[in-house]
Amino acid sequence: MNIYVLLKKTFDTEEKIAVQDGRIEDDGAEFIINPYDEYAIEEAIVQRDTHGGEITVVTIGDEDSEKQLRTALAMGADKAVLINTEEDLEEGDQFTTAKILEAYFKDKDADLILAGNVAIDEASGQVGPRLAELIGIPYVTTITSLSIDGADVSIEKDVEGDVEVIETSLPLLVTCQQGLNDPRYPSLPGIMKAKKKPLEELEIDDLDLDEDDVEAKTKTIDIYLPPEKEAGKVLEGDIGDQVRELVSLLKNDKKVL
Amino acid sequence: MSDKLLVIGEVRDNDIRNVSFEAIAAAKQISADAEIVGVLLSDNDLASAGEEFIAYGADSVITVTHDNLKNYTSEGYGQVVLEIIDELSPNGIVMGHTSIGKDLTPKIASRLSAGLISDVVDIEKDGEAAVYIRPIYSGKAFEKKAFEDDFTFVTIRPNNIPALEKDVSRSGEVTSKDIDIKDLRTVVKEVMRKASEGVDLSEADVIVAGGRGVKSAEGFKPLYELAEVLGGAVGASRGACDADYCDYALQIGQTGKVVTPDLYIAVGISGAIQHLAGMSNSKVIVAINKDPESNIFNVADYGIVGDLFEVIPLLIEEIKKVKA
Ligand SMILES: Cc1cc2nc3c(=O)[nH]c(=O)nc-3n(C[C@H](O)[C@H](O)[C@H](O)COP(=O)(O)OP(=O)(O)OC[C@H]3O[C@@H](n4cnc5c(N)ncnc54)[C@H](O)[C@@H]3O)c2cc1C
Ligand SMILES: Cc1cc2nc3c(=O)[nH]c(=O)nc-3n(C[C@H](O)[C@H](O)[C@H](O)COP(=O)(O)OP(=O)(O)OC[C@H]3O[C@@H](n4cnc5c(N)ncnc54)[C@H](O)[C@@H]3O)c2cc1C
């Protein structure tokens, strides 16, 4: 099976966010694989180990994205592709990302593409379905179980807590939700092997794309931090008094009762 | 010529979801004098749902009833919505940022080569143009976005943009439309209901959420009672779900539901960053935890340091008193 994983590098969840001139300050920040993309990598490995085939991990990013790609290779993916837009493109949005991926997948015979359900930074959840539509294959989002039998695919999908059992077929794009699997940690031999696995670097030129083809449809006007919350009030005294004070504050000050 | 905006509504168990009414209000904020065309899809008759959509501010409604619309699939809904767009040529689309909204809108946007601003919590005007505010980095920051061209396409987060007052004196045309849905490659075989009956978490005004501190499924009972006296819903941390005290359907956080109720009561929850990602934008946050150092107190408006099993029964009694 010809399996692809879409990977985005994101800020480490534990990072504090700072804003400078309307942009997120990312100097010195730790980056990780978007957590949902870890589920995608793990599932790709499980499916490959069951059905055979090869896993290619694809990211659009910059030079530094190599780190996350190597981690995916160390987990068990076979090949990696970095589409480096650093030199060519300034602005981009989900349209841009999907168009670049479309161009990449044009001559690939993908049976299964796995993406994350959402990237935890910009969190639109658009890229997977957008790409599937552009390359004309069906998609199922937020999956929590995947079984493949020949070309037939059976899926469990999380729908705001309910579970849908879905039948479809390959080729297919899925986006991964928590509960699908437990992503493995790279093993030491895995890390050693990853250093020698192929990592191809492309630019949009190699994909026959111009800046105009991928021009963003939306623009970011400003980024700002939420107003600093006033320090909360920890109530004091006898528990019974605290409860009464709380109810009074909720009712009279905040008017939420 | 004034704008024409489509509002795609969601019908669940024959009721329109509240977020769909909020989407109408959002459309009005985007363009005050726009013509608002509601779109409702189901396998059931939608005439009365259509009337309700009008009462909440739509100018007209198109309904499509077809067996293949019983369960949402991106293919089935996609075919219908694209055909309606083709016929009406709207200048924009608004929908709820729900399971269906998140799944469907990127497909439509891709087909239209349009931008899409997802998960909007507020709309501002910069002269004529609308500016959209959305949380990023799990609610740790916000961004203001706008469209490069004049096609508008947004999904709105439930519970942030208030719906308009229902006005049954409003009138408008509800048209049922026949659309042929071609064979679907993706079929929903079965739906297993896990989310509890009653108030929908993502739309609840009050949420009582329990964590590992609640210690057992049994321990959640007082939380259900508290939620009931408050007319709210029960949620949970992943800690509580992992420990099997409740179903994952209740999980709030980065990998669970994102909620913005008026009142969020966190009970026996430590306040891990992944949990905060799902609730930190709630309007008022109350924390009940026995550990005064617990991180949840850093986001809480009010905190009670104490044993939840002592505090919750007292709280239920006190609220019953003031509600009586
Ligand atoms: C050239 C360029 C310039 C950009 N400039 C900016 C900028 O100035 N400011 C800014 O905030 N953002 C910028 N972006 C990022 C862009 O706005 C979005 O972050 C990106 O389209 C992903 O959207 P999302 O974060 O909502 O991901 P989602 O749609 O939520 O991601 C869902 C899934 O899609 C896949 N995916 C997402 N992004 C990628 C990727 N890059 N490579 C491979 N797979 C991916 C992953 O599987 C992910 O889990 C730029 C992007 C590009 C390509
Ligand atoms: C990729 C990823 C995604 C995640 N996504 C989510 C998510 O979506 N949602 C989520 O919630 N978590 C998520 N987590 C997990 C998160 O990191 C925490 O582990 C989890 O939120 C902890 O749950 P908790 O607060 O219930 O448990 P704990 O951290 O164990 O806290 C229990 C609290 O209960 C208090 N307590 C104990 N007994 C009592 C008592 N009798 N009275 C009062 N207080 C008491 C304790 O003081 C403590 O503060 C995610 C983690 C990862 C790595």
Image (cartoon, coloured by chain):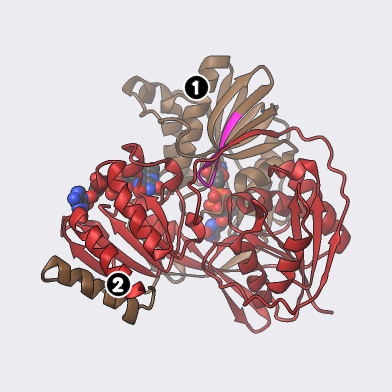
Q: Nearer the viewer, mark 1 or mark 2?
A: 2
Residue A56 forms part of the magenta stretch: no
Question: Chain B in the picture: what colour?
Answer: red
Q: Is residue A21 left or right of residue A146?
A: left
B73 or B274, which is in the foreground?
B73
Give the dominant element type of the magenta stretch: helix, strand or loop.
Answer: strand
Please indicate, yes or no, whether residue A25 appears anywhere in the rendered image: no
**Few, some or many C-alpha atoms within 10 Å of disc 1 (few <14, some 14-19, many ≥20)?**
some
Chain in brown colour: A
Q: Amino acid at mark 1?
A: Val
Q: Amino acid at mark 2?
A: Lys
Relative depth, front residue between A190 and B159: B159
Q: Are marks 1 and 2 in contact (CB under 8 Å)?
A: no
Q: Quadrant of residue B11?
A: bottom right
Nearer the observer, A82 or B181: B181
Q: Tell me which chain the residue with mark 2 is part of.
A: B
* Residue density around tag 2, few if under 14, some if 14–19, many if 20 or more, within 10 Å: few
User: Which residue is depicted at the point 41% across and 21% down?
Assistant: A193
**Which of the numbered marks, if any, corresponds to residue A46?**
1
Residue B321's mark? 2
User: What's the residue at 67%, 47% (across, down)?
Assistant: A130
- Which stretch did the figure color magenta? A155-163
Instruction: Give the structural element (helix, strand or loop) at label 1.
Output: helix
What is the tally of numbered marks visible in this picture?
2
